[in-house]
Image (cartoon, rainbow, N blue to C red):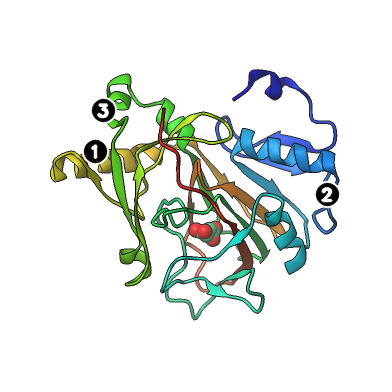
Amino acid sequence: MDDQSTKTPYRSLSVKKCSPHVGAEIGNIDLTRPLNDLELSELKRAFTEHGVLFFRNQKISFDDHARLGEYFGPLGSHVGKKTNSKPSDDPRIRLFHFDEKSERISGNVWHTDQSCAPHPPLGSILYMHTIPPDGGGDTMFSSMYAAYDALSDRMKDYLEGLTAMHDGVPTFGDGTPRAIHPVIVRHPESGRKLLYVNESFTTYMLGVPHHEGLGVLRMLYAHVQKPEFCFRFRWEPHSIAFWDNRCMQHYATDDYWPNVRSGYRVQIEGVVPPKAP
Ligand code: SIN
């Protein structure tokens, strides 16, 4: 990341860091109306610098939700054949509604959204209007920059140049894609290296003996969950979390049944994860 840019104060938005490695809460912004050029450029800068942006008290419509996503790229659609989230009445927006009738929730294993796709989403924007009355349903985020930086130089050397299979079939059923991605990726905007394997989708590493690759993957799955790399977001009604799916993993906490947790999500189309260096 450019040191100079982190030192330049924001002129329009308020940007309050949530933890050393993950996230910032964005204030002085109204997402129910189009943003001006300064707001948008500062929002893009904050997204690159902090990896997840959180907003409070934003009562957004489907159009507001889609507009925010489209500032960052065309909206994409979910690649899963069988999912726990559902289409909404608007083809751009996905419904995330769970209640006493839900047998499962979505996302309660650490993951990068749909990394099984050849072009996994750039990011996702989740808006929650209803949250469980007694708490619960927090979303946890982990920085894959911090996870990569904390590896030993020997492990970084071992992983550099390796690739891994990301398989959507075990989670989303037959007909869902599989894709091979680099284990170490360079983020196209920040230029930083990051760890790109996740417990939901990465099934094996190519180019090393199978049992050895599985052992390394298990170690990495435990590593990315270290609290030092994480931040736990507590939802309020009309909060928004907008994560950079290229550098943050997340985990949806499954502790609120039979209460209702309900909202909507859009995802933004991404590109092939670029290998490092
Ligand atoms: C997801 O995994 O995309 C859902 C996150 C959440 O419901 O908090």
Mark 1 in CB contact with mark 3 (< 8 angstroms): yes
Q: Amino acid at mark 1?
A: Val
Q: Amino acid at mark 2?
A: Leu
Give the residue displayed 64% in from the left and 69% down from the top.
92
Figure quadrant of the N terminus: top right
Mark 3 in CB contact with mark 2 (< 8 angstroms): no
Figure quadrant of the C terminus: top left
Left or right of 247? Residue 89 is right
Helix, strand or loop at disc 3?
helix
Q: Amino acid at mark 3?
A: Tyr
Residue 159's spot in the image, x, y percent?
29, 31
Q: CA distance from mark 1 to mark 3?
A: 10 Å
Q: Is mark 3 within 8 Å of ligand 1?
A: no
Q: Which callout, 1 or 2, points at the residue further toward the start of the chain?
A: 2
Residue under pointer 3? 158
Is residue 163 depicted above or below 114 in this figure?
A: above
Label 2 neighbour load within 10 Å: few <14, some 14-19, many 20+ = some
Is residue 152 depicted above or below 116 in this figure?
A: above
Q: In the image shown, does 207 or 32 lie closer to the viewer?
A: 207
Tell me if residue 61 can be seen.
no
> Which image quadrant is residue 274 in?
top left
Q: CA distance from mark 3 to mark 2?
A: 45 Å
Give the residue displayed 40% in from the left and 55% down from the top.
109
Residue under pointer 1? 216
Residue 269's spot in the image, x, y percent?
56, 55
Left or right of 102? Residue 152 is left
Mark 1 in CB contact with mark 2 (< 8 angstroms): no
Label 3 neighbour load within 10 Å: few <14, some 14-19, many 20+ = few
Give the residue displayed 63% in from the left and 69% down from the top.
93
Label 1 neighbour load within 10 Å: few <14, some 14-19, many 20+ = some
Residue under pointer 2? 35
